[in-house]
Amino acid sequence: MQPQVFQKAAKAPKPFMGWSSWSLEAVRSPSYNGEDWLTAEHVKEQADAMHRLLQPYGYLYINLDSGWKGGYDAFGRPLPDRKKFPEGIAAIARYVHRYGQKLGIYYTVGIWGDLYQANPQILGTSAHLRDILVQPPTPGNGWVNGTYKIDFSKPAAKAYIASIAQEFANWGVDLLKLDGVTPGSDHNDLSIDNRAEVAAWAQALAHTGRPIWLELSWNLDPHYADFWQRYANGWRITDDIDRYGPTLTSWPQVKARFEAAARWYQNAGPGKGWNDFDSLDIGNGALDGLTDAERQTMMTLWAIECSPLYPGDDLTHLDSYGLRLLTNTEVIAVDQAGRPAHPVRFGPQQVWAVQNADGSLVVALFNLDDQATVPVTVTWWELGLSGPVKAHDLWSHRDLGIYNDRFTQLLAPHACCLVRLIPQQN
């Protein structure tokens, strides 16, 4: 399954930052009408807002999720929906590239039923689509029903993937989110297994001549972390952050990331790739479905675990608190340093920590209790420290003082504290 020589198209030295359309497509709100919301006009509005408000802080990617595609061309390659994108995807790429931004696009593994029925010829070959499918027909991705699996022992199968990869590169795409990947996507029993297709996509992207970030989705199986690291730049480690209700997300979706982070944190880092916690929906106030404390906790967890930072909010309606969260330079620096924290203490009150190259530590304290305001403490013994230590609050940019053997913070339900602990010479 693995080629003898392969190098990822991008080295992924740090997590990407940007914006994604899916949360606004998924929310049940009269202002955002499902996948119909995804249009060239709306994407340009988000790019304009990101350029003005977030790009100075490192946010670069404008990622189109499901809903951009119309039909297929004569060779089975996807075409944009011309009602939504009348000038095509290449025009959107040119628009964001003028800002110095990057364009991401969404696609799925496997073959869907409409393409199966069309059975087009594969570009540059005499084969047709049905010639490259597993026989007897087998489900092709995490949605299972109505999909077909590709057989990569057939040479034309890689040619087909390469034809789409080159099309994306020609459009000016900079990131591909490949969805429905198994083992994962709620199907971990190897009855589908898209690893051969992931490898084919990685190779095809690498040969386009354009560096294209490969992001896998969703809820990937950590037992195959070595494989994801070999072929991809990042991978979603959970189900969707979206509530699929009147708000973008909710506290239970955020809380579920703590358990997932404990399973995955060792698998991320420079040269490996990044654990993707999904959209960072903390910028639209009530529409987010979170309290202010929960919004700060969400940003803190994403940052200490070095998840890609990409709000799914409407960037044209960021509130002042959300904007402050998304643009805190000290917190962003923790994410971009690329050192995922490890759990020091788990349970209702949690402590996560990571050591920096200069000997200081970044430590996050969380109170996940739903009712009680409680003190959360971390001791120097737990962190391998000794002697006096200065604590610096990353959210407020304030020095908190010198502590001799422990640090304690009183935290309300779902609240957090993020500090840098700096050992002092005796």
Image (cartoon, rainbow, N blue to C red):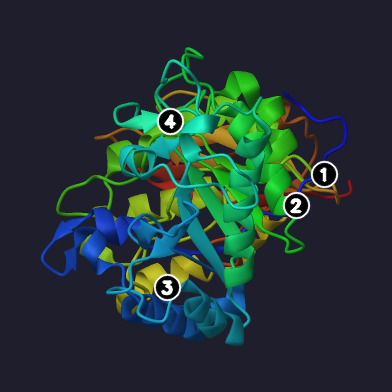
* Gap in angstroms between the C-alphas marked 4 and 2: 23 Å
Q: Which mark is residue 7?
A: 1
Q: Residue at position x 49%, y 39% from top?
A: 129
Q: Evaluate if marks 1 and 4 touch, with contact meaning CB atoms under 8 Å apart.
A: no
Q: Earlier in the sequence, mark 1 or mark 4?
A: 1
CA neighbours of label 4 inside 10 A, class few (<14), some (14 to 19), many (20+): many
> Could you tell me the amino acid type at mark 4?
Asn
Q: Which residue is mark 3?
A: 323
Q: Residue at position x 58%, y 62% from top?
A: 167
Q: Earlier in the sequence, mark 1 or mark 3?
A: 1
Q: Residue at position x 26%, y 34% from top?
A: 370
Q: Evaluate if marks 2 and 1 touch, with contact meaning CB atoms under 8 Å apart.
A: yes
Evaluate whether residue 373 shows in this view: no
Nearest the viewer among 189 and 404 is 189
Splitting the image into 4 quarters, where does residue 239 fall? Answer: top left
> Could you tell me the amino acid type at mark 2?
Ala
Q: Secondary structure at mark 3?
A: helix
* Gap in angstroms between the C-alphas marked 2 and 3: 36 Å
Q: Which residue is mark 2?
A: 206
CA neighbours of label 1 inside 10 A, class few (<14), some (14 to 19), many (20+): few
CA neighbours of label 3 inside 10 A, class few (<14), some (14 to 19), many (20+): some
Q: Which mark is residue 141?
A: 4
